Amino acid sequence: METNLSPQAEAFIAQFVKLSSGIQIDAGKGYLITSRLTPLLETHQLKSLEELAGNLKREPRGRLAEDVIDALTTNETLFFRDGRPWEALRKEILPGLIRRRAAERSLSIWCGAASSGQEPYSLAMLIRRHFPELMGWKLRLLATDISESMLERCRQGLYSAVEIGRGLEPELLRSFFKQEDAGWRLDASIRGMVELRRQNLTHSLGSLGSFDLVLLRNVLIYFDDATKLDILRRVRQIMNPGAILLLGSTEMTNAPEWERCIEGDCRFLRKAA
């Protein structure tokens, strides 16, 4: 099994990933391509990464293409990641949105990079624990990801002891998880709160609906500046007046159409009402 990759094949794969998903693989990160794609050789019965690149060039759609995108997508996540944004959601963001939407008794939320589910399920647990009144509303909690394998992990709701130990409070573990031989399974009542759907952020978002709260955290860092601005423009188009956009701690836009509501490590932007 040959794992060397020519500069031409490496450049082709990086360009393929950029065009297919918007994800930017910087020059000099050939080791990332090599290490993540090597396991696909056995899966697809290929002899070398050069053969993989050739097959991908001949057939840029299909199972191999999907597996390449899956392999080169970073899926780092954990329950209640970064702490401060979840405090802001509990104390400021969700209470404000509940007041704003009280007459309609409806609230729509979108997690745009679900990964293996810890973010949307953290939000579902937060709602069940601190805002039980929303269970009587028309509540929509949509979670999307480009990776079908990650969405399948979301559907299963099964997490290892290491994943459970990263950010999950013991009380939530006792309330919403059951231990199995393979790990900890999230209760079906929480999984059932979340609608799962595959979505490429660089494609049209119009079919997703409109939202009062969007979590687009720790994903824009993988795109170049032009792609970031394009995604933010299209995200804004599907946000309701007064809706909130929550970004990651290192992500920010200075575009004048956004109102910056909280400084510091919680990036909290509001669309003009």
Image: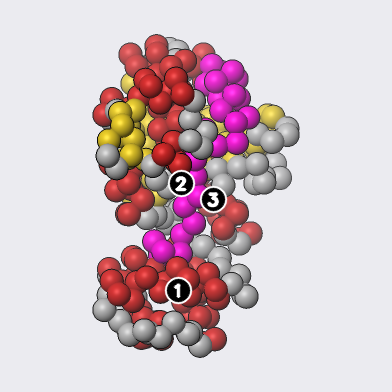
Most distant residue in the front direction: 181
Of the image marks 1 and 3, the number of the one nearer the N terminus = 1
Q: What residue type is disc 2 on?
A: Ala
Q: Which residues are magenta?
A: 69-96
Q: What is the chief secondary structure element of the magenta stretch?
A: helix
Residue corresponding to mark 3: 219
Label 2, secondary structure: give it: loop
Q: Is residue 95 left or right of residue 20?
A: right
- Dividing the picture into quadrants, the one containing residue 108 is top left
Mark carried by residue 113: 2
Q: Which x, y percent locates residue 216?
A: 52, 43
The quarter of the image holding the N terminus is: bottom left
Q: Answer above or below: position of 127 versus 213.
A: above
Badge 3: residue crowd in 10 Å (few <14, some 14–19, many ≥20): many
Q: Which residue is nearer to you in this view: 40 or 7?
A: 40
- Dividing the picture into quadrants, the one containing residue 118 is top left
Q: What residue type is disc 3 on?
A: Val
Structural distance between the alpha carbons of marks 2 and 1 = 20 Å
In the image, is residue 71 part of the stretch drawn in magenta? yes
Residue corresponding to mark 1: 16
Q: Answer above or below: position of 91 versus 165.
A: above
Q: Which x, y percent locates residue 142?
A: 37, 37
Q: Are marks 2 and 3 in contact (CB under 8 Å)?
A: yes
Badge 1: residue crowd in 10 Å (few <14, some 14–19, many ≥20): many
